[in-house]
Image: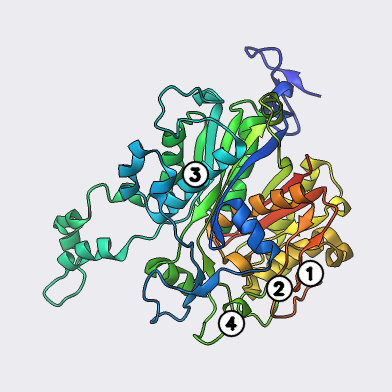
């Protein structure tokens, strides 16, 4: 039984079991996805990614953006023919100079999502426009990674911080070396700058946040957007994630974390990423940005929007640092079960699963253990939608792109082709397959992450 709170309006109550303040009028607001924006190695736009997945194409190829010949991993999925200047108002183009690539692709994906949702925002040089939503009713929650600095910018400061023996001297760095960094250098690499630029361009003055939880970032951000809208603090949000780790520092970090396959020049790039195959040698990186427009169903309906999907449930959990795969799966199990509970769905109501499916055996083992714990023997019957063999591991960008693809699956009632050059184990239906039509009502999108975070979201046919 809930109790009224003295001093608060009559429609606010405190729940003795859930221990949070809530308004029955707001917490039940349905949230829908109305716009998709994706920037991937398969091209610009969610439609380009969708068509590539349907055809079973992969963007994985030898790295071209820098000389990666000295790295043990020399294959990734790079975004082709991209310029952020094409996706911002003319009056904002100077700001592109202080955007790291992660920021640039997030800004571009946000504009594509706005266009797809047929929203009117201030991302134009026309000062006489009337935005679809009042600025304070638009929020922004975007997942981001630890942005890697450009080597040329960093080395100018480092070489002026060496001692007489050519070793890095922290005192010299503090006295003057760091002054050789470019002006506004830090503003180019702060993770919260993805959301910052998106909110400035579109004048989104509602709740805003940045989540940096590796592969789980995008889904966690979408979950927060859902809750912001559900409780009535906004009617519309930008949500998802973006990350671009295909650079010397990003590649080095992931190699030291033992996440990447050792590649050779003469091998088929698609032969490395083999989800749930215990013989796989590791993952490959991809540049990814996936931004969705999510809205309150009632306001979306009022403006005549056509939703791709409704967000039925969301959950998050954290895994222990040590243990066997089943023990390490506890966080993802909790996230999936929480999403199912909120959606009021039994596990057998899930028609497809879009997991992270990284192709890193020790990571996939944990993910598979979580799926088997929740779905039991039925796990082998639920088709997986695997996009990492096509797009690479986009880290913080993966969740947003996954939501875009799951939304397209529901819209078109179709499952894309799957690439797989091995044999998935653990009873997971993730082997090679062609595109096929399917009756899809509920899709589970889920991911674990490098730091132990886990997220799960259920999208349903609107």
Question: Mark 2 or mark 4, which has the lower sequence index?
Answer: 4
Question: Mark 1 or mark 4, which has the lower sequence index?
Answer: 4
- Residue tagged by mark 3? 210
Q: Position of residue 295 (x, y in %)?
A: 64, 33
| Of marks 2 and 4, the one in the foreground | 4
Q: Which mark is residue 428?
A: 1
The residue positioned farthest toward the left in the image shown = 164
Observer-nearest of 259 and 350: 350
Quick check: 62 above or below 3? below
- Residue tagged by mark 2? 276
Q: Position of residue 402 (x, y in %)?
A: 64, 54
Quick check: 189 above or below 165? above
Determine the CA span between mark 4 and mark 3.
37 Å
Determine the CA span between mark 2 and mark 3.
30 Å
Question: Mark 4 or mark 3, which has the lower sequence index?
Answer: 3
- Residue tagged by mark 4? 268
Report crowding for label 2: few under 14, some 14 to 19, many 20 or more residues within 10 A (C-alpha).
many
Tag 4, which secondary structure?
loop
Observer-nearest of 147 and 434: 434
**Contact? badges 2 and 4 (CB < 8 Å):** no
Quadrant where the C terminus lies?
top right
């Amino acid at each position: 039984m809930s109790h009224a709170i003295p001093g608060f309006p009559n429609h606010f109550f405190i729940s003795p079991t859930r221990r949070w303040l809530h308004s029955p009028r707001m917490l039940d607001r349905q949230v829908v996805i109305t716009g998709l924006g994706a920037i991937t190695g398969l091209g610009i736009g969610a439609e380009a990614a969708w068509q590539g997945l349907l055809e079973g194409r992969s963007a994985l190829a030898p790295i071209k953006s820098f000389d990666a010949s000295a790295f043990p991993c020399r294959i990734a999925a790079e975004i082709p023919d991209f310029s952020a200047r094409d996706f911002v108002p003319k009056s904002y183009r100077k700001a592109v100079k202080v955007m790291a690539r992660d920021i640039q692709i997030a800004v571009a994906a946000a504009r594509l999502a706005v266009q797809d949702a047929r929203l009117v925002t201030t991302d134009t040089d026309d000062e006489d426009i009337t935005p679809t939503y009042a600025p304070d009713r638009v929020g922004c929650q975007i997942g981001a990674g630890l942005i890697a600095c450009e080597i040329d910018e960093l080395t100018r400061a480092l070489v002026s911080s060496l001692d007489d023996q050519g070793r890095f001297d922290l005192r010299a760095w503090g006295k003057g070396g760091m002054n050789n960094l470019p002006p506004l250098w830090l503003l180019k690499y702060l993770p919260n700058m993805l959301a910052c630029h998106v909110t400035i361009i579109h004048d989104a003055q509602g709740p805003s946040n940045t989540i940096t939880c590796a592969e789980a970032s995008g889904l966690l951000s979408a979950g927060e957007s859902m809750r912001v809208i559900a409780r009535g603090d906004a009617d519309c949000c930008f949500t998802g994630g973006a990350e671009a780790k295909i650079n010397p520092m990003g590649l080095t970090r992931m190699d030291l974390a033992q996440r990447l396959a050792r590649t050779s020049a003469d091998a088929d790039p698609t032969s490395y990423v083999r989800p749930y195959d215990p013989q796989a040698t590791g993952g490959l990186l991809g540049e990814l940005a996936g931004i969705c427009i999510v809205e309150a169903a009632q306001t979306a309906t009022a403006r005549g929007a056509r939703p791709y999907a409704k967000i039925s449930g969301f959950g998050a959990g954290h895994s222990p640092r040590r243990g066997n795969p089943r023990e390490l799966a506890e966080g993802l199990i909790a996230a999936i079960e929480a999403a199912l509970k909120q959606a009021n769905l039994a596990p057998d109501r899930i028609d497809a699963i879009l997991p992270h499916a990284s192709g890193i055996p020790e990571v996939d083992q944990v993910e598979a253990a979580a799926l088997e714990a929740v779905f039991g023997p039925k796990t082998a019957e639920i088709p997986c939608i695997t996009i990492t063999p096509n797009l690479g591991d986009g880290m913080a960008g993966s969740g947003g792109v996954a939501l875009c693809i799951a939304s397209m699956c529901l819209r078109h009632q179709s499952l894309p082709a799957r690439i797989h050059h091995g044999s998935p184990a653990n009873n997971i239906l993730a082997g090679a397959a062609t595109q096929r039509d399917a009756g899809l009502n509920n899709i589970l999108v889920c991911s674990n992450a490098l730091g132990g975070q886990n997220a799960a979201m259920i999208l349903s046919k609107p």
